[in-house]
Amino acid sequence: MHIGTFRDALFKLLYARHCGGVNVLRIEDTDRNRYSPEAEEEFIETLAWGGIEFDEGPHFGGPYAPYHQSERKALGIYAEYIRILLDKGFAYKAFETSEELEQMRRYQEINKLQTGYFGGSWRDAAAEQVAEAEAAGKPYVIRQRIPRDTTIVIEDAIRGRIEWDSNTVDDPVLIKSDGMPTYHFAAMVDDHLMEISHIMRGEEWIASAPKHAALFDAFGWERPIFVHCPVIAGKDGKKLSKRHGATSVLDYRDLGFLPDALVNFVALIGWAPGGDLELMSRPQMIEHFDISGLQPSSGVWDYDKLKWFNGQYIRAMEPEALLETIIEYVDRPQTFDFWELMACDKDAGQLTSADPTSTLSELKLLRRFVTEEPTYALEAIKLEQPRVVTLADFGEACAFFFEDDDKLPMDEKAVDKWLTLPHVPELFQRLIEAFTSMAQRPSDQPLAAEACESLVRAFAESHGMEKLGPVVHPIRVALTGKTAGPGLFELMSVLGPERIISRLNRAGKLAGTPGIPPAK
RNA sequence: GGCCCGGUCGUCUAGUGGUUAGGAUGCCGCCCUUUCAAGGCGGAGGUCGCGGGUUCAAGUCCCGUCCGGGCUACCA
């Protein structure tokens, strides 16, 4: 599901909840070429993941079932209503072939006329002529007879009054030659039948709104309130599309975004609660949501701000809940399918700064530890929680906790800079000795960060060092292979004496320091 | 081409005739600090698309203009 569609669905939910109304899902599957069960499944999956709840719909039941338009068509619902329009003269049969329509359009374009079907040869055809064509078995569509020489006015809840010279509105197809209704017909009939109060949809529908209004008028039905929401655009101002990055909601799930963060962010494109409120819980959004806060102008998708929201939501989570969420994330096969795809995609750089191939292997490592050693993994996650943006980031951030001691990748520059310092061999040796004796007297207590700190500080002091950096950095590089990460003492406490000893040994050799005895 | 919609820092936005045009993000700096983040503090960034009016007073009202976008299917 496209981000824009998702945002609209969210607005509908928020508004329904705000008003104590009913949110209904209807599957508009009248185009047999476009519809697929897989697409519908993806739709439902997206809605469920995003917490977009429905009170009525094909998978939820309700008083106006069925909720698939194809099923409603089979029931003869649309046939019944098109009959009424035909009888009242608000619709007519048109027998043009697609070639004839194509020719007409070309003629209009060449002569710089308005394009569209404004009657052709059938709007005003004699009854006998129509009967003749029908008897001859010619295929036909049923078109809406838009009133001429008048003004069609709609009252849009966001933009106010919008009007059209009805002579500029062409006659849309209501029933296709295969008997299926178009959106223009089916959605309006259903909206009436299902007692829909608000038509909330994307701005791209404004152009067809006069047709829809005229249809309600033709039936003598009360018009719902039209709410045309602004579109979400890419950085270049054009409709958000693949080349702007990911447009599918599920891609953001697989990228490691939290549904609540995405929802919070997306709600704020085209809507503002007024004042300075930005970070909002779902109940807060419902409380504040109102059509008067909707923006008429389109918004641009700002990936950076989405990332900020996600970071905020990750930091706000209880570590235990976060661990659960991460487990869910790495247990989902789609996560790995997605990163496989990313690894092959040249444009993946728009979405991640990290190399997808390494993300993939780091996520596998994360999956192993999170299920096999959840207690250890939890401690690692706690330390990385404040410095991560997406769930996927935990892969890289935590990798050094999980990687085998002898396979830990070492940043070359960091090795050159910190492991070559003259005091490093002695430092490592002292630490190895200290931790070895600790390891030989195993206790139930985990290694305390304070103990590590005093050890390191003692070394610095005994060497007359005023700053801790020259001591801390070599140890960090030895233990993590990197120069960035959580506080050294916290990280040592989580790693534990065994891993520390083994990594110090390895790093010592890497630095070309001879003479360090084996740890055990 | 025609018809429609839109236009406040790069971006999301507050603002409904009187504000030093506010917040958020991003960017930069400082603090914190063993690194990176997070967090705290601060800074740069807006002639409210442009031009006319109305008014003592206009981002806010009116007209024009420019630019951007959407639609222009037997798709939704």
Image (cartoon, grey):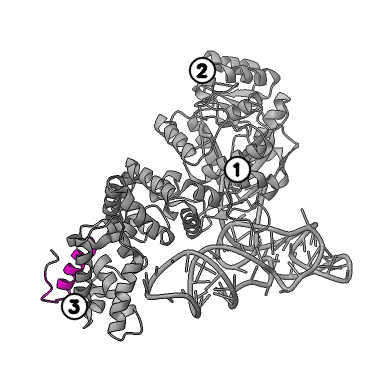
Of discs 2 and 3, which sits in the foreground? 3
- Give me the chain letter of mark 2: A
> To which quarter of the image does residue A15 belong?
top right
Residues in magenta, as a range: A499-517
Q: Few, some or many C-alpha atoms within 10 Å of disc 2 (few <14, some 14-19, many ≥20)?
A: few
Quadrant of the frame with the C terminus of chain A: bottom left
Alpha-carbon span between mark 3 and mark 1: 62 Å
Residue on which disc 2 sits: A74
Q: Few, some or many C-alpha atoms within 10 Å of disc 1 (few <14, some 14-19, many ≥20)?
A: many
Q: Amino acid at mark 2?
A: Ala
Mark count: 3
Please indicate, yes or no, whether residue A209 appears anywhere in the rendered image.
Answer: yes
Q: Few, some or many C-alpha atoms within 10 Å of disc 3 (few <14, some 14-19, many ≥20)?
A: many
Q: Amino acid at mark 3?
A: Pro
Alpha-carbon span between mark 2 and mark 3: 82 Å
Question: Are the residues under marks 2 and 3 on the same chain?
Answer: yes
Q: Is residue A424 magenta?
A: no
Closer to the camera, B67 or A197? A197
Which numbered disc flags the more N-terminal residue, 3 or 1?
Answer: 1
